[in-house]
Image (spheres, rainbow, N blue to C red):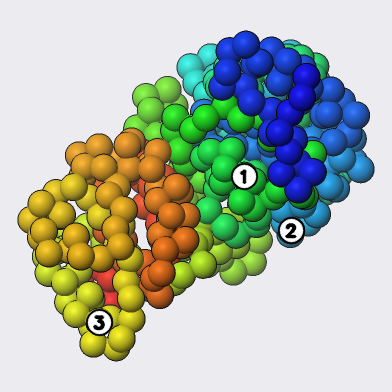
Amino acid sequence: MEWQELKGTKILDAQDPDRAGAAVREAAAILREGGLVAFPTETVYGLGAAAGNSAAVHKIFAAKQRPPDNPLIVHLTSMEQVRELTLALPPAAYLLAERFWPGPLTLVLPKNATLPAVTTAGLPSVAVRIPAHPLALALLKEAALPVAAPSANLSGSPSPTTAAHVLADLAGRIDAVLDGGSCPVGVESTVVSLLGPKPAILRPGGVTLEMLRGVLGEELVDLTADRGDFTGTPPAPGMKYRHYAPRAPLYLVEAGRKQGKRLEALLQDLLARGKRPGLLLTRETLQARPGLKAFPLEILASRRDPAAAARELYGALRRLDDSPVDVIVAEGFKERQIGRALMNRLRKAADLIFAENGRD
Ligand code: TXA
Ligand code: MG
């Protein structure tokens, strides 16, 4: 089958049902030969390589320019595969797997000696997940290998939710992208560590705190820090890096009383200083302040629909970055359900946060 290419990166179109089977087979063959393939998951696109092939995994770190101390998530299709890579599993692993897999949940578990050190950045633990996206599952089954896959972006830039985002960052640096259209969740998986005495959330994501509490009750510890400014060793190595960030500085106006007034004051101040702001707003704010339509603008769904906002977030940040703006001003959401993951990503991307009690 002939495939389009961009700078030597094959574009394996799996959106066309007539070509999807061939696209998956080609992608699987590349993984088996030790190559790099970006593929869609329900959260974001992953950059896959055979998790047991250390040379292939090294190529992931090089292509993404990822710090070598940040371990990868290993993508699997079954509990049998999970058991092959780990030591004895705690009961919580079975409870969570039963309820949330396949799906946007990653579990950190004690690893055995099967995987090379590079995949887990030398840690004695491994992060595993069974994704729900049909193309991800088809690819993993066809390749019949554990597949290590971080998000398929350049390290530090917003995660990709379309094949076009992947190509914008990685064309010419990877062998292929399996194009399955846009990702339905839009933010990364929830990372839960089962290494300690109690299950602990290391990164909020597609499976919400509320959903996890439904299974684990008050046992669950939330180690999610808003800013990721850790001293010492953070529980998830990824937590210490500035993340998900567009090139333009991002100013975040948190939810709360007088959010609209704080937003307007900030815009006035930016304009007075000759800056060109681009806006990331909810439908409600735009309805209340139609004058804001004069700015470059991305609408992030309704305030009442954080799931839609999560789906749109990374694409909207990339589009604003591609327009002539000096600064991105984003409106904050309430922290409930997937709004927690959304706010975690916005705060990590933010250069300045305007909270209810002024700047902080
Ligand atoms: O939704 C997702 O999780 C996507 C898709 C492709 O599956 N993947 C993803 O991978 O977001 P990445 O590499 O961008 O984020 C992985 C996170 C990082 O914060 C990393 O530090 C953490 O998981 N992690 C991986 N292995 C770990 C371990 N052994 N212990 C603690 N944290 C770990
Ligand atoms: Mg990432």
How far across and how far down the image is residue 173, in percent?
77, 50
Separation of marks 3 and 2 at Cα, in angstroms: 36 Å
Callout 2: helix, strand or loop?
Answer: loop
Marks 2 and 3: in contact by CB < 8 Å? no
Residue at which label 2 appears:
65
**Would you call the spot at circle 3 few (<14 residues within 10 Å), some (14-19), or many (20 or more)?**
few
Q: Residue at x 87, y 25 (%)?
A: 32
Horizontally, is 319 left or right of 358 in the view? right
Kind of residue at badge 1: Val
Disc 2, ligand 2: is the CB inside 8 Å? no
Vertical comparison of 47 with 316: above or below: above
- Of labels 3 and 1, earlier in sequence is 1
Q: Which label lies toward us, 3 or 2?
A: 3
Q: Which mark is residue 166?
A: 1
- Of labels 3 and 2, earlier in sequence is 2
Q: Nearer the viewer, residue 192 or 43?
A: 43
Q: Is residue 319 visible?
A: yes
Marks 1 and 3: in contact by CB < 8 Å? no
Q: Residue at x 36, y 38 (%)?
A: 338
Q: Nearer the viewer, residue 242 or 317?
A: 317
Residue at which label 3 appears:
271
Kind of residue at badge 3: Leu
- Of labels 1 and 2, earlier in sequence is 2
